[in-house]
Image: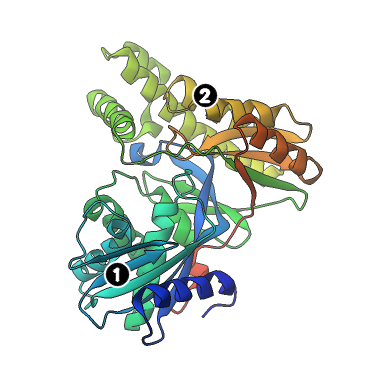
Amino acid sequence: MPTREPHDLIATAIRTLEDAGGPGPAPATAWAPGRCTLVGEHVDYAGGNVLCVAVDLGIAVAARASATSRYLVASGDTVVARSGAGPEGDIGDRAFAPVLALRERGFAVPVIEVGIAATLPSGAGLASSAALIVAVSTAVLRLLGATLTARDLAAAALAAERDIAGIPCGPLDQRAVIDAADGGALLLDCRTGDETTVPWPWADVLLVGCDTGTHHDVGGAEYRRRRKETESGLKALGVASCQDLRDALIDAAALDLTVKRRLRHVMGESVRAGEAAEALRRGDVAALGGLMSASHQSLRGLHEVSTPALDAVVRAAEAVAGCAGARMVGAGFGGAVAALVTRTGADPCRRAMSAACGGGRTFELRPSPGVAVLARDVVRD
């Protein structure tokens, strides 16, 4: 097992499995990080650019073959037992979707039992669903003694979440959770699939997060509506990617004003992501923070996915000395805020963010390597 996986959390996942399912053979284990977008939200499904980091909050799983032909998943006090792996509307949907996705790729995956332990908050916009699916996929591959390339593992995890669990997500989360390099951000071009690693240049500048406690549902009606509006606008203009959009093209189009706002967001957000990568390369804290704040303004005003709680936390962070910028992360409609802040300003920023949403949990978001680095026994070149 790679030494950089968090052994304490993995031990908790093993105990959770054994408490729920009883003693049995030693399980295969895995850990996957979460994802924090720096700039580039709601553009992966529009073929845009995204700058993000994998973070050291994540999800550990322990998986073993079932001795009773019963699927079982345990997380905290929640235990679900089933006869099948297909979606049933409970926590097993994401835990068992990798079984079906890997079977579709020719792997003889048995009926499994899974224990889960997490430091990553659920529903906060930090890719907890993708982290869980990638962790289970990795553990199952270890159980089988099998391997996949990073790109194939990401494709299997995306199929598990989108096609089997039914969540209309783009490719960002799976690629970030798997492909993130050690000590850097990932610039992902969702039109071509190309990626670039941008080193994190600072020892004294960090990301702090605050979970507002109002959790989003990436599969909910409003997310689906934003995606439909964006994709319908791209289709009407005859472009495959938001990178092909221009102001004049949007201005001249006979489109609903709401659709035009969605297109302006994805066009501008993709450009901002590229500019943010350049700011990171230069070590320009003020520029990166300003782009993060501009991203939030666009998500609030053009894509309309923010909430009063998210806006309040962003304002509170931006008012703290040492904070260069802040934005909501994830699909919106609730979730978390991330702020770019100097180390000396981190604690005041965390206190201000928490107070702005009535005592929300705060945490440092340190860049983490992805599963392709952590699980080299499973992820092959």
Q: Are marks 2 and 1 in contact (CB under 8 Å)?
A: no
- On the image, which quarter does residue 351 sit in? top right
Question: Which residue is under mark 2?
Answer: 308
Looking at this view, is 205 or 28 the one in front? 28
Task: Using residue 190 as the reference point, say whether residue 285 is left or right of it.
Answer: right
Q: Position of residue 261 (x, y in %)?
A: 39, 19
Looking at this view, is 59 or 154 the one in front? 59
Q: Relative to residue 315, is residue 343 depicted above or below?
A: below
Rendered residue at 43%/66% (across/down): 116
Q: Is residue 287 visible?
A: no
Q: Amino acid at mark 1?
A: Leu
Rendered residue at 42%/51% (across/down): 173
Q: Position of residue 219 (x, y in %)?
A: 31, 41
Rendered residue at 56%/57% (across/down): 57
- On the image, which quarter does residue 285 sit in? top right
Q: How is the image coloured?
A: rainbow
Q: In terms of secondary structure, where does tag 1 sit?
A: strand
| Of callouts 2 and 1, the N-terminal one | 1
Q: Relative to residue 351, is residue 300 depicted above or below?
A: above
Q: Position of residue 109 (x, y in %)?
A: 24, 76
Quadrant location of the C terminus?
bottom left
Question: Which residue is under mark 1?
Answer: 72
Q: In terms of secondary structure, where does tag 2 sit?
A: helix
Q: Position of residue 186 (x, y in %)?
A: 53, 52
Looking at this view, is 378 or 357 the one in front? 357
Q: Amino acid at mark 2?
A: Pro
**Distance between the Cα atoms at labels 2 and 1?**
39 Å
Q: Relative to residue 125, is residue 225 depicted above or below?
A: above
Q: Is residue 164 visible?
A: yes
Which class describes the residues within 10 Å of circle 1: few (<14), some (14-19), or many (20+)?
many
Task: Using residue 104 as the reference point, say whether residue 134 is left or right of it.
Answer: right
